[in-house]
Image (cartoon, rainbow, N blue to C red):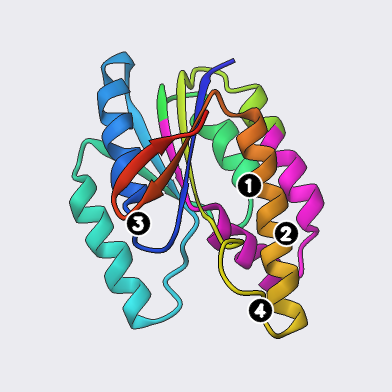
Amino acid sequence: MSNVVFVIGGSRSGKTAFALGKAQEAAGVGSRIYIATAQPLDAEMEDRIEKHRRERGSAWATCEEPLHLGSAVRAASRSYAVAVIDCLTLWLSNLLCGNLDVEEAQDDFIDSLRTPGRLLHIFVVSNEVGMGIVPENDMARQFRDMAGRLNLRLAGLADAVYLMVAGIPVKIK
C-alpha cells in the first residue's frame, strides 16, 4: 500500500500549497500527477483553474476528473508515483449535483487508494466543513454531514493527517 497523506482545513487555509509542497519533496521517487475535481462552470472558476495550472508548472501531469475519482486514481496508478487529489468536497458537490450514488462513488474511491499500483505517495485535499455554524437548510446540512463522513473515512485510512490552520500545518496523525 502506498503512503496516503490527508490534508484538511478551511477555505484558503493553504491546503493545496502544502500538499503540493509535500508531493514535491516526494517527487524524487518518480513522476507526478495532479488529479483535479474542479469544473470550469463559470469565468471565476476558469481563472482559478488556469492560475493553479500555471503555479504547478509543466513538471505536473494533470487529470481533470469531476466525477469518477476512483477510476482516475486507478489510471494514474499505472504511470505515476506521486499524486495530489484536490479536492474531495468539490468532488462530493459534483456527485450530488450529478445525482450520482454518493456512497458507491466513495466506496470506489476508497478502494482505489487501497490498491494504488505504482503510486507510492498520494496526497488527498479536502475542506473541513463541520467546524462552523449548523447550516439553516436541509441540503446544506446533508452536504456537511456527507463531507464529514467522507473526511472521517479518509482520516482513518491515511498514514498521516494534517489540519491546515491559517497556512500552518498541524499534524494530527
Q: Is residue 147 above or below residue 4?
A: below
Mark before the other along the chain sequence, 1 or 4: 4
Q: Secondary structure at mark 3?
A: loop
Q: Amino acid at mark 2?
A: Met
The magenta stretch spans residue 88? yes
Q: Quadrant of residue 89?
A: bottom right
Q: Amino acid at mark 1?
A: Asn
Residue 151, numbered label: 1
Marks 3 and 2: CB-CB under 8 Å? no
Mark before the other along the chain sequence, 3 or 2: 3
Distance in Å between CA atoms under marks 2 and 1: 9 Å
- Per the image, the residue denoted by label 3 is 13
Marks 2 and 4: CB-CB under 8 Å? no
Q: Quadrant of the N terminus?
A: top right
Give the residues in magenta.
Answer: 83-110
Distance in Å between CA atoms under marks 4 and 3: 21 Å
Q: Amino acid at mark 3?
A: Ser
Q: Amino acid at mark 4?
A: Pro
